[in-house]
Amino acid sequence: MTLLAIENLDVRHGQLLAVKDASIKVDKGEILALVGANGAGKSTLLRAIAGAHRQTSGRIVLESNDISDWQSFQRVKSGMSLVPEGRKLFQDLSVEENLVLGGVAGRKGMWTVDKIFETFPMLVKRRQAKAATLSGGEQQAAAIGRALMSNPDILMLDEISLGLSPAAVDLVYASLNNAKSGMTIVLVEQELSRAMNFATRIVCMLEGQFVLDRATRDLNRQEITAAYFGKQRSTH
Ligand code: ATP
């Protein structure tokens, strides 16, 4: 069953058309990794879906609602949550306070402050620490926890590995693996092996368009790399 549908989406940064006529459907329970070279349009697409950057044309449909003109906060209330690139925590607030703020949309579900600490054990000792004092990995975990606090139907994550040590990325993914059960996830991930290990479906973007869209089990690394560099166009 389709949870999210993007239809003929164009998204601009001024004169630059960063996402071009993009259409895609994401089913409930899918874990989709968006991959592609720097500047391919992945973050712009996620931000447009979350309502942080308005599309020029096209539609975004969540379940049966056309949310194209909705504010971000309305989208969160309807079950969409974004972990933005750079985490964007409230630096002067504690981890716990950041989490509580993540829950203000008031959606009911399994995620509570205690459940977040259970799922992200690395945060337990840092509960009262200000976000600014956390390590990169802890900040990323707190940002994911904050997004989960709105009990989303679809969780979107933008480059959670960025700037973290491999060990910290391992920890973040291990926690995310515990959290993902039943959830629909769209993540932007630069590291192909991480994307392939985590996602059930890989979608590659090149110059604002989808050039590969396939189940992970039907793909190998070479095919994805070829799509990265525009050597292949296949969405089947
Ligand atoms: P990266 O992995 O580098 O974040 P990306 O695939 O997420 O790449 P985007 O960040 O969406 O790509 O960028 C798509 C295009 O839009 C690029 O050409 C980029 O330079 C441009 N762009 C992104 N953000 C802005 C902005 N705030 N103002 C102007 N141009 C932008």
Image: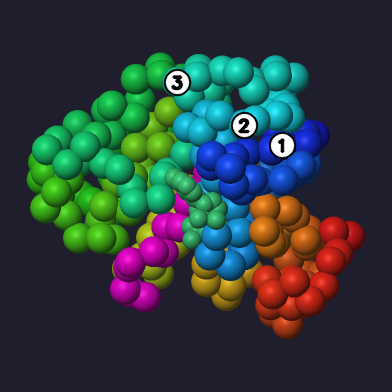
Q: Name the residue beneath numbered marker 2.
A: 55
Residue 132's spot in the image, x, y percent? 14, 48
Residue 229's spot in the image, x, y percent? 69, 75
User: Is residue 152 shown to the viewer in this render?
Assistant: no
Residue 30's spot in the image, x, y percent? 69, 47
Q: Amino acid under label 1?
A: Leu
Q: Quick one: SS at disc 2?
A: loop
> In whole angstroms, how far apart are the C-alphas of marks 3 and 2?
16 Å
Query: If the image is split into quadrants, where does the N terminus sit?
Result: top right
In the image, farthest residue toward the front:
15
Q: Name the residue beneath numbered marker 1.
A: 9
Tally of marks: 3
Q: Name the residue beneath numbered marker 3.
A: 73
Q: Amino acid under label 3?
A: Phe
| Residues under numbered marks 3 and 2 in contact, where contact means CB atoms less than 8 Å apart | no
| Residues under numbered marks 1 and 2 in contact, where contact means CB atoms less than 8 Å apart | yes
> In whole angstroms, how far apart are the C-alphas of marks 1 and 3?
21 Å
User: Is residue 34 shown to the viewer in this render?
Assistant: yes
In the image, farthest residue toward the bottom:
222
The answer to whether residue 164 is magenta is: yes
Query: Which region is colored magenta?
Result: 155-167
Q: Amino acid under label 2?
A: Gln
> Where on the picture, by quarter, is residue 234?
bottom right
Other-residue count near label 2 (Cα within 10 Å), few / some / many at <14 / 14–19 / ≥20: many
